[in-house]
Amino acid sequence: MLHQYVEQFLSYCQIACFSERSIGTLTARLKEFNVFIKSKRVKSPRAIAYTHLIDFVSDFKLPSVHVKKSRVWTLRQFFHFLVLNQWISKNIARDLPYPKIERTIPKYLTIGEFNQIIKSLSHRTDSLIELRNLTIVMLLGMLGLRTSSLVSLNVQDVDLTCGLIWIYEKGRRRRTLLMPYVLCELMQKYLNMSRRKTGPLFLSKRNRRISQRSLQNIFRTIADQTGIEKKLHAHLFRHTAATLLNKVAGIDVTQHVLGHARRSNTLKYAHLNPDQYAVYMRQHPYMKKETS
């Protein structure tokens, strides 16, 4: 019943430069919504009621809060598109509330833990795969790249003469970052060993562009080799990069490197600088014991 509207909406999303990940999410959620609406025997978009949307958001075997949030976002986008094309008169999904997600305390690697990972990988750089893994960890831990940006990197996105790397962010935005000297040296060694001038920067063992699943396997192997108890993932390295950058360069530089449009987003990643905190506490008027 909604199939033709969904197809046109997804085509619109591609023209509007939605990311591949966003389009994949919209496709999956709208497929679920189409099945749900069919079960309610609703015959047109105009016949869809607000109660239908509420029931859908919480339907299908008690979905997680993240799935509910994804469904709300999808319905808001889809019904906005229907209004633009005058297939319905009002975006009834606009009033759908986003579910509350409990905030968890973000984690990051300490300098000791990050150095432990680098030291472990540095002992096995004679292998192209191990050298690739070290380069990936350094990129994530020093520049805080998102997984999607790392996966989409090509050899031609790296300029070692100027020490620059071009990355693609959400919304297909292209940004330029300056690589530290140690990362440039490592990247040069990796490119020399791979002997490739174009194509994906990081390949899997099957000579295909590395995937998010491959990255998970790499992190799992690193955790086993180093004995680090924290669950390693790309976002953990992003938090680590933000924390270390904030410690030496401040929040403005950290915001630029992470590619955040809003300073408030960067503050979620850049954890409290322990050095500044220690200085503050030493100067606190009640830290010293008064003598009578």
Image: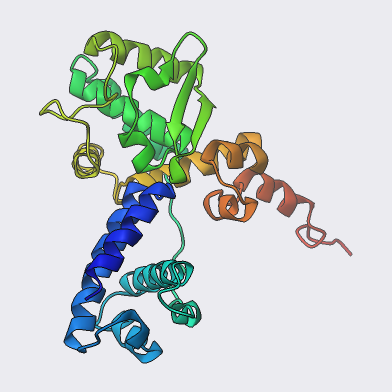
Q: Is residue 90 left or right of residue 40?
A: right
Position above or below: 91 against 120: below
Q: Farthest left residue?
A: 206
State the residue in front, 254 or 18. Answer: 18
Q: Farthest right residue?
A: 292
Residue 23 in view here: yes
Color scheme of the displayed model: rainbow
Residue 201 placed where, x, y %?
Answer: 29, 24
State the residue in front, 38 or 285. Answer: 38
Residue 4 placed where, x, y %?
Answer: 25, 66
Q: Which quarter of the rendered picture does the C terminus lie within?
A: bottom right
What residue do we see at 52% from left, 27% from top? 177
Residue 237 placed where, x, y %?
Answer: 40, 42
Counting every numbered tag in the picture gives 0
What residue do we see at 44% from left, 12% from top? 160
Residue 60 in view here: no
Based on the displayed image, in which of its 4 quarters is residue 63 positioned? Answer: bottom left
State the residue in front, 138 or 47. Answer: 47
Based on the displayed image, in which of its 4 quarters is residue 74 positioned? Answer: bottom left
Q: Which quarter of the rendered picture does the N terminus lie within?
A: bottom left
Position above or below: 113 against 56: above
What residue do we see at 41% from left, 70% from top? 82
Position above or below: 46 against 22: below
State the residue in front, 68 or 76. Answer: 76
